[in-house]
Amino acid sequence: MDDLYREQILEHYKRPHNFGPLEDADLEFEDNNPFCGDEQHVFIRLDDDGKVEAVAFEGKGCAISTAATSMLTDEIEGMSREELLRLPKEFVLDLLGIDISATRMKCALLGLKIVKSASLGSSADWEDEGQQGDPAQTTRTGI
């Protein structure tokens, strides 16, 4: 089963879904993982009900960060900003379907961090990507 997940990760790395800029984005954010050099920028367009109508990302990084963000962007269409903020790290880890070492956890969760930061309009309070916590609990007036 791990081989199937690894193939899926490589496929998303080679041909990431929702890759490229998105015009008329309502929300966007970019960040990086200074430990390995991964850089990503997310663009989110909301519909009239405040739900994700379209999402895209661009950047560069390792297979894990690119695949995780590609998979995440496939899943968040139709979610509200509040739902994005409540997404736990396990959501992304389940999409990847393989064990992620502590050293690769920041790679795997970079996309989630930028999606939550875009939803907030500023950098999400993200003490340690290796532990569930602050981003899912953060609230902001008007969200």
Image (cartoon, helix red, strand yellow):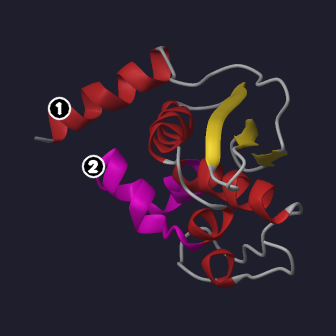
Specify the amino acid type for callout 2.
Gly
- Residue drawn at (51%, 22%) of the image: 16
Kind of element beneath mark 2: loop
| Magenta-drawn segment | 86-107
Residue underneath mark 2: 97
140 or 71, which is in the foreground?
Answer: 140
Q: Main secondary structure of the magenta part?
A: helix
Specify the amino acid type for callout 1.
Leu
Looking at the rendering, which quadrant does residue 43 occupy? top right
- Residue drawn at (51%, 33%) of the image: 70
Q: Is residue 135 left or right of residue 13?
A: right
- Give yes or no for residue 49 being in the magenta stretch: no
Q: Are marks 1 and 2 in contact (CB under 8 Å)?
A: yes
Kindly identify which numbered label has been placed on residue 4: 1
Q: Position of residue 7 (x, y in %)?
A: 26, 25
> Which residue reaches farthest top?
15
Q: What is the C-alpha distance between the residues marked 1 and 2?
A: 9 Å
First-in-chain label (1 vs 2): 1
The vertical placement of 101 against 76, above or below, is: below
- Give yes or no for residue 99 being in the magenta stretch: yes
- Residue drawn at (82%, 36%) of the image: 25
